[in-house]
Structures are given as C-alpha cells and as structure tokens.
Image (spheres, rainbow, N blue to C red):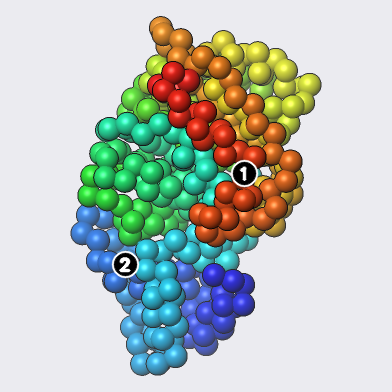
Amino acid sequence: MDIKKLKEIDRVFRQYGIEGEDTFRLISTQYLNAHNPQKISKELKLFWEEGKVLLVNISEDKIARQTLEYVISNDFYGENLPIIYQFFLSKRFRDLSGKFFTPKNLAWLMAAMLPVKENAVIFDPTCGGGTFLLEASKRWGNKKCTLIGNDVDKLLVVLSEILLLLNKKNEHKLKFHNQNIYNSTQNLELLFGKVDYILANPPFSLSIESFEIKSKLFENGYRNSDALFLDLCLKILKPGGHLLCLVPHSIVANKEYENLRNIIEQDWEIASIIIMPEGTFHSTSNTTTRADIIYLRKKSKEKIVDKIIFGNISNLSHLTNDKEGIIANYKDLAFLLDDLNIEHTLK
C-alpha cells in the first residue's frame, strides 16, 4: 500500500474525527468482522468492541464504507496491517523506542533459514507488527507448532494477534504476552529452557540500568538492549535451540565489542553471520541504521554446528513485495538457504 493511498484513507476518516490510533482500530475491526475469529484474547476482544463503535459512526457514509471495503478486498489476509499501523501511529512507534519494523522480505529470508520440525516452539520476544511470526507460520505450513509473541506495546501485541489470526493454520497454537523483557521476566519464566527457536529484531542500543536474570554480559559492563537480549535468549532457549536475530553492525564489527563476542562464544555455537549494508530498514522506517543477521545455537552436550557460514551482502538494491523480487535483491544469499538447511550443519 503506497503513501498516496494511506493519505487518502486518512482524509476520508478525519472528517468524522477518526484519526491516528482510531483509524487503525477501525480498519482492523473491518478485518476482524470479515474473518470473525473465535478464540481471541481479552485485550483483542476489547479492541474489537471499541472498533465496532467506530464502524457505527461511519455506517451511513458510502465513501467511508467503500474505502474500508477497498482495503480488505485488496489485502484480505491483512499483510498490509503493519504498514497501516506504522503510518497512523509512526510517532508513537519510533520515538525513543529503538525499534524499526522488519522489512517483510527480510523476515521471510530469516524464517527460511530455520529447519522445520514438528511441534516446534517459536518465540519472538519483541514481536512488533508480527512479521517474523507470520513468516514462520507460513514456513511451517500444515506442520504443528506454537507461535509466541511478546511486546512492550499493548497495541503491537494486538496487531500481531490479528495478523496471525487472519493467516494461521489450525495446526498452529498462538500465545501472546505484553511486557518489557528488560524489566520483568514474570511471564517469560514459564518459557525458560522450553523454546526451540527465537526469531527477532530486538530494540537497538537502548541503555539498560538493571536486569533481573543472571547475565555474563551485564556483569561485564554491557548495559544495552542488544547485548542483554542475547543473554535473555540464552535463558529461554532449550539446549541446542536456535537464535536468529538482527543486531547493530557495531556488535559484529567494532573493537569495543570484542570481549562481548568472546563471551558469546562461551555459551553459543556460531552458525552464521551475515553482514548487511546500510539501508536495511529504509523501506519500512526511512533510516540508515545498519544491522546484521546473526544465527546462533545454544550449546548443548553435543556439538551441532560443523561449519560457520559468513555472508557479506554489498547491495540490497530495494526490498520488493514479491517473492520473485527477493531472489534478485538477495541473490548473493541464495546459497545460504541451501547451506543453512543442510542436516549435518544445523540439525
């Protein structure tokens, strides 16, 4: 959905005093009405009821109704919802949060690196718009799995739940939490040592003053969200569990993080490091923040990783919205998908 269409949608609903979060709520409600999911959280139920009130307010306006119908008819499964959210709530999402929405095709690429197995527990501790969980759901197809999302922003948790409800298979269980992973582990403790895969784009470079769990990185002076996210994941994953996430390029390359990298190797096997160019998030957040992909395995009694795969992507071109386009933009990475799914490399 392009910016011109989003501005037109904004104009249509502003005449009723509906803007920002309420516009997002109104559009989301139209999706929910179209799909009518049965098993939903209390938070989503309340969100939906509030949206139904907004729908009544525009029920007599033919243009407003046609606008909603246009949005749904061109995107029945709601994959534009993260774009809609970001347009109408962009200031709330970005300001001081350290967050950037993950481009859809980058999430697809990272999910494609995970080996599919029956009954996998897949967790995104900072799920944002639910893009990673959606791509993981598509990759698992009809195989059984549990998809778990968490975010500090309650509305983002609602967005993720809607997106997964509109797209999920019956074989996929959904669970959602709403908490700050750096301030409290109350709900997360139930997941400690029980998760197979973590797929995430955590907040970048936020200062963290205190941390509940025992953390080698925190004890060694690394008091930022990037480093502490790694130790949190170490606690959550099963032995041999996979962590596939984005980190600032400085974590991978800068001298000041050399000791951090040494500490990581005490508890993790490195499966892959993929260096990305500037502009990774430009299509979704208009920022030049540079991020790299790291693929780690939590150490277990048995050594799993036989080789480390390094990639250096020099040019992303632009992120397209079709699966064919990603092959052109990421063709330097095509060999990685084959290598990373070799059974003896990552089991």
Nearer to us in this view, 280 or 188: 280
Q: Quadrant of residue 10?
A: bottom right
Residue 207 appears in the picture as rendered: no
Q: Position of residue 162 (x, y in %)?
A: 36, 58
Tell me the tag on residue 331.
1
Q: The C terminus lies in which quarter of the figure?
A: top left
Q: Amino acid at mark 1?
A: Lys
Q: Is residue 226 above or below residue 22?
A: above
Q: Amino acid at mark 2?
A: Leu
Give the residue drawn at x 58%, y 20%: 308
Q: Is residue 346 above or below residue 145?
A: above
Q: CA distance from mark 2 to mark 1?
A: 37 Å
Tag 2's secondary structure?
helix
- Horizontal side, residue 216 vs residue 181: left or right: right
Per the image, the residue denoted by label 2 is: 32
Q: Quadrant of residue 251?
A: top right
